[in-house]
Amino acid sequence: MIVGIVEMEIYIYEVNSLKEKRQVVKSLIERLKNKHNISIAEIGDLELWNKLVLGISVVSNSKLIVEKSIESIRSFVENDHRVEIVNTIVDIA
């Protein structure tokens, strides 16, 4: 079993409140869950309205599949015009 763990720090554009942030975060998480077979949660910067930290895990029997999934997730988030990836930490074991 191969497990990929990703911590993704994201900046959110054009939000001015925690309520607006929650709308973007909920939408992004649901779209990622629907497109990829992953576990995902908001794990940091909960009190900041323009910043988000996501924790993502991918499990497979192939390291190549995990790596491709993580790259696909990163690409998906990069193509969302509402957000920008600031930092990504990836650990595959």
Image (cartoon, rainbow, N blue to C red):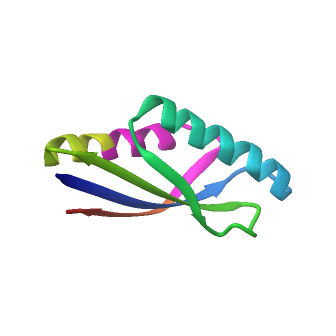
Residue 83, image x and y in percent? 61, 48
Quadrant where the C terminus is found in the figure: bottom left
Residue 65, image x and y in percent? 20, 40
Residue 14 shows up from this direction: no
Q: Is residue 5 magenta?
A: no
**In the image, 31: left or right of 4?**
right
In the image, farthest residue toward the front: 1
Residue 48, image x and y in percent? 74, 68
Q: Hey, which quadrant is residue 30 in on the image?
A: top right
Q: Which residues are magenta?
A: 70-85
Q: Hey, which quadrant is residue 35 in on the image?
A: top left
Residue 86, image x and y in percent? 51, 62
Q: Is residue 28 above or below residue 91?
A: above
In terms of depth relative to the viewer, which is nearer, 5 or 87?
5
| Residue in view at x 75 percent, y 50 percent | 22
Residue 32 shows up from this direction: yes
Q: Is residue 75 magenta?
A: yes
In terms of depth relative to the viewer, which is nearer, 13 or 43?
43
Q: Is residue 31 above or below residue 56?
A: above
| Residue in view at x 33 percent, y 47 percent | 70
**In the image, 84: left or right of 93?**
right
In terms of depth relative to the viewer, which is nearer, 46 or 49?
46
| Residue in view at x 41 percent, y 34 percent | 36
In the image, farthest residue toward the top: 35
Numbered-mark total? 0
